[in-house]
Image: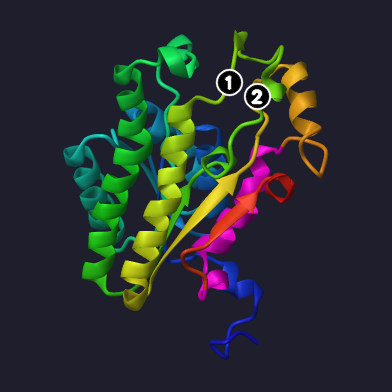
Amino acid sequence: MSSKGKESYGERFQLAGKTAIVTGGLGLLGRRFCAGLAEFGARVVVADLDGDGVSRFAQELEARYGTACIGIRCDVTQPAFVNRMVDQAAAQFGSIDILLNNAASKSEDLAQFFAPFEAYSLEQWRKVMSVNVDGMFLAAQAVGKHMLKQNQGGSIIQTSSIYGLFGPDERIYEGSCYLGMAINTPAVYSASKAAVVGLTAHLAARWAKYGIRVNTLTPGGVESGQNDTFVRSYANRVPMGRMGHPDELVGAMLFLASDASSYVTGHNLYVDGGLHAW
C-alpha cells in the first residue's frame, strides 16, 4: 500500500491522464524517453527543431502505444517558440504535468565543438550555451509558470551529464573517435551541464511548496557511435565495466516523472554504471 493509502506500488508508476513535454524529443535519449512515457500512458508532446520529424514520430508513438501524442517544432533558444509550444500543449491536452527538459546541442560543426579549449571560440561557446543553458531556462520557466497557474503540481526532469559534475579523464580519448572524428569533452559541455544541476537545485527549493518537483537525471557515457577504442577505454573507467545503453535511462526517468517519486525533489539521479563512485 502506498502512502496515499489506496493504489498499489505499481500503479504509482503509471502516467495515464498526464501530459508530458519532451524537448530534444528526436535525440538519442529523447526518442527513448518519449516512448517510455507513452508506454506508461502519458500524452506526449515531442518537441524538436524538425517539424516534420516530430509529427511523424508522434504518429508512430500513437500507433504503437495508443495514447495521444503530438509533435511541435520548437527552437528552445527562442522564447516565442517555447511559449508557443506550451500554449499548444495546453490547448491540446488541457494540462501539462511533466517536463523532460532534455534538449542539448553539439552544434552543427563538430570540428568547432571538439576544438581544444585554448583555441575555443566565443561564438561556438555561446551557440552551445544558448541551447544547453538558455534553452533549459526558457523551457523550465514557461512550463513552470503554467504548472503554477494550474495549481496541480508537476514534475520537471532536467538532463545533465556525468561530466557536469566531474572532470573528464583525458586518457580515455587517446585514439578515440566519434563518427570518424577525434573527440574530447569540451569545457563548454561540462560547464553547461553543471549549470543544469544548479538550476535544478534552485527551482526545486523555489517550487516545492507548490507541489512542483524538480530533479536532475545524469547519464554516464552512452554508446552512440564512438569507436571501439573509446568504448574499451571508457568501460575500463566504470565499475560495471561497460558503457550505458540509451534504454537504460528510461526507468530512472519514469521514476522521477511519476508519483513513485512523490517525495523526491532537488535530487541528482546518476545512471552511470557507478562511474561517480570511483
Q: Is residue 2 visible?
A: yes
Nearest the eye: 70 or 118: 118
Measure the alpha-carbon separation of dots 2 and 1: 7 Å
Give whichever of discs 2 and 1 has the lower sequence position.
Answer: 2
Q: What is the crowding at mark 2: few (fewer than 14 residues within 10 Å), some, or many (at least 20)?
A: few
Q: What is the crowding at mark 1: few (fewer than 14 residues within 10 Å), some, or many (at least 20)?
A: many
Report the residue marked by disc 2. 170
Q: Secondary structure at mark 1?
A: loop
Please report the residue visible at 33 percent of the width from the left and 29 percent of the height from the top: 51
The residue furthest left is 80
Q: Main secondary structure of the magenta part?
A: helix
Please name the amino acid that badge 2 sits on: Glu
- Percent across and percent down for residue 190 are 49, 35
Please report the residue visible at 19 percent of the width from the left and 41 percent of the height from the top: 79
199 to 84, vertically: above or below? below
Please report the residue visible at 65 percent of the width from the left and 24 percent of the height from the top: 170
Q: Is residue 99 visible?
A: no
Please name the amino acid that badge 1 sits on: Asn
**Nearer mark to the viewer, of 2 and 1:** 2
Q: Are marks 2 and 1 in contact (CB under 8 Å)?
A: yes
Residue 95's disc is none
> Magenta residues?
244-263
In magenta stretch: residue 106: no
The residue furthest bottom is 5
The residue furthest front is 118
In magenta stretch: residue 247: yes
Report the residue marked by disc 1. 184
- Percent across and percent down for residue 43 are 42, 55
Q: Quadrant of the N terminus?
A: bottom right
- Percent across and percent down for residue 36 are 57, 50
Q: Secondary structure at mark 2?
A: helix
